[in-house]
Amino acid sequence: MDPQDQPSDRPATVVIDAAFKADAPARYARLRELGPIHPAEFQPGLEGWVVVGYDLAREALTHPALLKDATPAADALDAAGFVLHRPSVGLGAQMMEADPPEHTRLRRLASAAFTPRRTAELAPRIERLAHGLIDAMPPAGELDLVEAFNAPLPATVIAELLGVPPEHHRDFRHWSAQSLRPASPEHRPALASLHGLLAELVADKRRRPQDDLLSALVSVRDREAGRLSEEELVGTALMLVVAGHESTVNLLGNAELALLRHPDQLRLLRERPELVPDAVEEFLRHDAPVERSTNRYAAEDLELGGVAIPRGGVLSVALGSAGQDAPQAGPGDPAALDVSRPGARHLAFGHGVHYCLGAPLARLEAAVALRVLLSRVTELEPAVPLDSLDWIGSGIIRGVLSLPVRYRAG
């Protein structure tokens, strides 16, 4: 479709910058009123299209000509003047940037180590960690929930799951947080440091295997047909760290913020803790922690939602916007927060072959953490105006940098 044939009130280019991200739900709602797909600037020098509607998002996430690997589109990208902003130190070879059949092989091998049994067995440890973090708080006062509870819990879980020694946990947590914020000056050094630590740990686990996920990945790499290369092994571990830790930190923060904005829903969840698993799905739908998918690249000329995407075009799916647009079962306003909503439909973990491998762990961590928090923290209210909070300003993650609250813990 020629740009001049599009409605005149449709923005020429949606600039997804810090101001947009701070107001993302409202901005995406306005875009959905204009159409399901829009031209966008994801960061300086990288333009493409963003999909904001639910039905078109599902189509885009499974479209056979929209690839995660940019190589087939590289010539067209160069000709169009696009600059691929890949880190100078990469995530290694891993499934987030691969397509079938390579993606199929990598996911199968990673799944052999990251099993449902291993995830389910973490529940008691997650609960102990959550109680321990609340025990460490003063009985009442003010604190930042992100720093005191949301960040250390999933960081410790993924560090222990991988077998990262305790003396590295603080650096591990910091590097993980910075690695998904491309505008941060610490982004590339953090990626390099995290990659180096995991490479050292992989070598150590090969010499002295233990009962942890890195040792299991090393075992898979050494025994399986079509096994992981060394680069793929480190890349897979790095993907689990970055995606698993930061998304859960912000799932918790977005859930807490939603409850602070809707005290009636906070009271309901306290009174009916059995609603927590469904509430987690509602929080994922209401304000997804992964705001956008990683980029797809058009391997050929195609049309999506009536818009012509040339070969080499870059496309991202607004997962959070799609959740707000998803049809929901039962009565009530689908746009409103409802922790009693059964089976909220969303795309927070993606769709299709790239559906998040760590989704069961994220759900488990969020459910256990919220249940413990609401049972132990008997009073909870914002310590600053909620419209004054600072949001993560770049990248695909959505969440607040801090969440100051007044509380009383029992």
Image: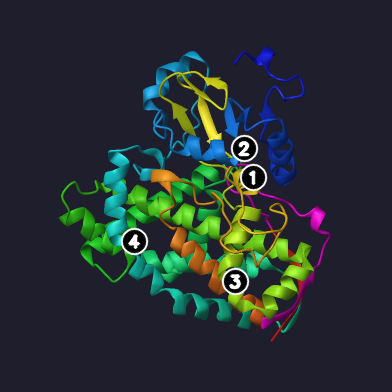
Magenta stretch bounds? 376-401
Q: Residue at x 26, y 45 (%)?
A: 105
**Which is more N-terminal, label 1 or label 3?**
3
**Residue 325, disc:** 1
Which residue type does callout 1 highlight? Asp
Q: Position of residue 251 (x, y in %)?
A: 59, 59
Which residue type does callout 4 highlight? Phe
**Which is more N-terminal, label 4 or label 1?**
4
**Marks 2 and 1 in Cβ contact (< 8 Å):** yes
Q: Which mark's residue is nearer the viewer, 2 or 4?
A: 2
**Which secondary structure class fits the magenta region best?**
loop
Residue at mark 2 to residue at mark 4: CA–CA distance: 31 Å
Give the position of the N terminus as an image quadrant.
top right
Residue at far front of view = 331
Q: Position of residue 103 (x, y in %)?
A: 32, 42
State the residue position of label 4. Answer: 114
Q: Position of residue 278 (x, y in %)?
A: 58, 66
**Residue 52, disc:** 2
Give the position of the C terminus as an image quadrant.
bottom right
Q: Which mark's residue is nearer the viewer, 4 or 3?
A: 3
State the residue position of label 3. Answer: 276
Disc 1 crowd, CA 10 A, few/some/many (<14, 14-19, 20+): many
Residue closest to the eye, 260 or 264: 264
In the image, residue 395 above or below residue 196: above
Which residue type does callout 3 highlight? Val
Which residue type does callout 2 highlight? Val
Q: Is disc 1 placed on a helix, strand or loop?
A: helix
